Image (cartoon, rainbow, N blue to C red):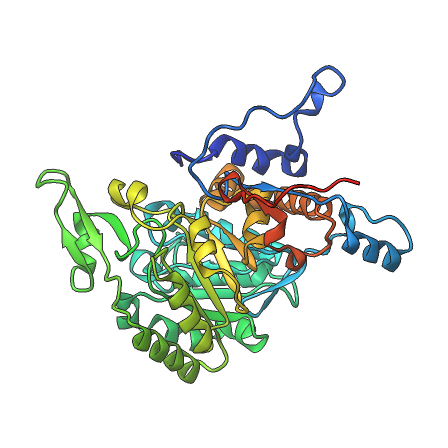
Amino acid sequence: MTALQTSRFPEAEVRDRARRGAAAVFPDVAGYGRTLYGSEPAERSDDVLDAMRLVPPVFMPQRLEKLVELAREPLYPDVDLRTTVGGFAAPLPVYLSAFGSTQVASADLGVAASRQAGALGIPMVIGENVVSAGGYRSSGGAQRSLLDRVAAYAEALPAGLGGLAVQQSTEDADCEVWNLVYSDPAAQPLLDTGRLAFELKTGQGAKPGLGGMTVLDGSAAARVEDLYAIDPVFGPGAGRVLRSSSPGTFTDEILRQQIRFMRNNFPRARVWVKLHPGRDVREAATVAWEAGADAVTVDGAEGGTGWAPTSFLHQVGLPLGECLRRIGHHSGCLLVSGRIWEGARAAKCLALGARAVGLGRAGLLAVDEDPDAGLLRMVDCLALELRLLISALGKYAPGALDAEDVWSAATVRPEGALRVG
C-alpha cells in the first residue's frame, strides 16, 4: 500500500472490499447472532443517484419466466451478468476507466491495474498523455510505459473476453500514438481478435472544458515544453510547474468527421468516444452514435482520478445522474463513470440507460491496497452485489433493468385515488 489518498470518497470501504472481497457485501459476520440490524435514517444527499432507491415490485413476471426456464425457483446466482461493452464481451457490466498520466497512475499501479483487469476479462481504457509521462516503450527497469500496460493487460486476458481502448490527446497525436499501437506487434493479438479500440476524448468529468493537467518538476517540464503549455503557477521557488494539454475543439461536424477519420484509418479497431458532463451531452452522444461510435463514455462531474482545480471539482459540470436523465432513452452503447464503487449505484446507472459502469478511483485504491489481487476481490464483491440487487428486482440480466426499477422522492407524482372494492 502506498500513500495514495482520496477526499470525499469512501476510501475505507473500498479498501475493505479489496481485502475481504465478497464477504464485505455484508456486515461483519462476527456480529451475527448478537447485533440487531436495520435501516438507518438516510443522510440527505444532493447526489441524484444517491438520493434514488431501487424498488423491487411485488409482481414479478420475469421471475416467473425464469422459474419456467429453470424448472425451479430462481435465486441470485442465476443472474447472468455477461454483456457486451463497446463491442467487447465482458463477464459483467464493468470496465476499468482511464487513469490519465498523473504521478498516481504513472507509477507501478498502472501496470498492476492492467494485469488485474486483464485477469478479470473486463475492458480497460488507457488514458491520454501516458507516452509523454512514461514513454511508449520502457527503456529501463521501471515499467511505466504505455506498452507495459498493454502487455500486462493482454498477457493476463482470457480468450474471448475483454478489450483495450487507448486514448489519444492532441499532443499524443503529434507522437502518433494510435499509429504506433495499431502497427505494434504487441497489440496484434488484441487487433486480430477484435479487442482493440481507440477512444476519442472530448473532455473529462473532473475538469470539463479543460485538457489533462499534471504537476512536473523542472527537468520533466523541460522535456515536454514543446508539446504542452507550462505554467509556473506555484511560484518561482516551488520547483514544480503546471503542465496542461489542449482540450481539443469540437463542433458536431468536427466530432462526426473525427469518428469517420478513425473508422477509415483504423478499420480493425473499435471506436469509443468520451464526453465530459456538458449541458449538451445528449446531442453530443447522438452525433457520436450516428457517426458510428461503438461506445459513448460519459464521465460525470463526480469522476476523476487526476489533478484538477478545486473550483472545477465542486462547481463545474453535470452530475452523472443528470447526464443520464438528459440522455434518456437511446439505442447506443452508453458507458458511464463517476464515483462508482458499489453495486447499488452501478445498478441505478444500468437502470437509467448505461450498458456498463467504469471504475476509476475505486479501481486505483483497490490495486493500491493489494497490487496482486485487490481489484479482483473488489470486482468479485461488485458482481455479488449486482446479482443480489438484479434478482431482487425480479430480473436476471443487467440489460433487463429499466427506469421503473428506481424511485426518487424528487420525481414523485400524484397517481390519483386508489379504488378499493
Q: Position of residue 10 (x, y in %)?
A: 48, 34
Q: Position of residue 383 (x, y in %)?
A: 65, 47
Depth check: 99 or 44 in front?
Answer: 44
- Seen as rendered, the residue at the extreme top is 34
Which residue is at 23% across, 62% downward? 246
Which residue is at 59% across, 58% downward? 156
Depth check: 343 or 268 in front?
Answer: 343
Q: Position of residue 210 (x, y in %)?
A: 25, 56
Q: In the figure, is residue 178 to the left or right of 329?
A: left
Which residue is at 33% across, 50% downward? 317
Q: In the figure, is residue 305 to the left or right of 57?
A: left
Indicate whether 382 appears above or below 263: above
Which residue is at 51% across, 62% downward? 334
Q: In the figure, is residue 130 to the left or right of 356?
A: left
Q: Position of residue 319 (x, y in %)?
A: 40, 48
Q: In the figure, is residue 219 to the left or right of 76?
A: left
Total numbered circles: 0
Image quadrant in which the C terminus is located: top right
Quadrant of residue 21 in the image? top right
**In this rendering, does residue 208 appear at all?**
yes
Depth check: 242 or 283 in front?
Answer: 283
Indicate whether 330 appears above or below 71: below
**In this rendering, does residue 97 appear at all?**
no
- Seen as rendered, the residue at the extreme right is 71
- Seen as rendered, the residue at the extreme left is 236
